[in-house]
Amino acid sequence: MARSYIAQVLVLAKTKLGETDLILTLLSSENSQIRAVAKGARKPGAKLCGLSEPFTVFDAKFHAGKSLDIVQEAGAVESYASIRENYNCLIAGSVALELATLVTNDGDTIPRLYAMTRAFLDALSIVATDENEQQLHLLLTAYLLKAMAMIGYSPEYELCAQNPELADLLRSTFAQLAKSHSGDNLQASKRQLRQTVNFTEKHLPAPLKSLIYYKKSM
């Protein structure tokens, strides 16, 4: 018997399928990964064309398939266009999307991952307008710390116990970091991020390509 369901999703990645379709990798509001076919999404003017870009959030009705689900209906919620228009924020956001893809790839559900990633993107969209490099580094550091803690790698023993500033980032909200205009040293923020990147790369099962690009841009 055919099964349909409704979900709000964040587009993590897209892959071409045939002449006009796309396979979308999605993070649902239930904190699980969905892989679904968006039929006709590559046709000019198709509704799904605009909804299939990474960072886009939409509500949709899905038809459940054996290996891939199918997007039947969809309505836009948020596009995060400002992130895509700012190169540095685009790379930072891509790190979050790739990490979310990796940690949910085996069907795992990570509690609060969707809400945390949305909160990060909300804050990143503010920084994309302000173009504050220090805030950008602080936001990504905080996201990596929180995400690693969520999947069972608590940073406090290897990083935060030795660095109270990283502990503060772990506790801070993304909104606070995005709106802060402190006089902290930019080089110190870069150093914190490098520490966190090293910790992340040590424990993840696969490297994050977007994180490599981000390191090169620092």
Image (spheres, rainbow, N blue to C red):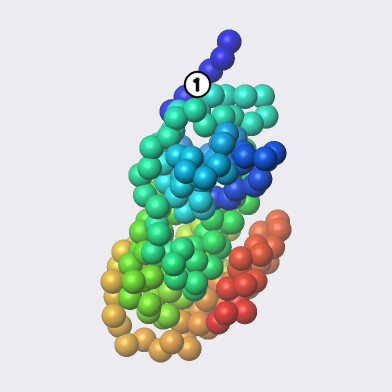
- Tell me residue 44's x, y (percent): 52, 45
Q: Is residue 184 visible?
A: yes
Label 1, residues with CA under 10 Å away: few <14, some 14-19, many ≥20: some
Q: Residue at x 66, y 45 (%)?
A: 16
Question: The N terminus is located in which quarter?
Answer: top right
Q: Which residue is mark 1?
A: 4
| Furthest residue in direction top, as rendered | 1
- Tell me residue 104's x, y (percent): 59, 45
Tell me which amino acid carries mark 1. Ser
Up-down: is 137 above or below 152?
Answer: below
Q: Which image quadrant for residue 125?
A: bottom left
Closer to us: 46 or 194: 46
Q: Is residue 9 visible?
A: no
Q: Secondary structure at mark 1?
A: strand
Question: The C terminus is located in which quarter?
Answer: bottom right
- Tell me residue 141's x, y (percent): 48, 70
Closer to us: 37 or 121: 37
- Tell me residue 48's x, y (percent): 48, 40
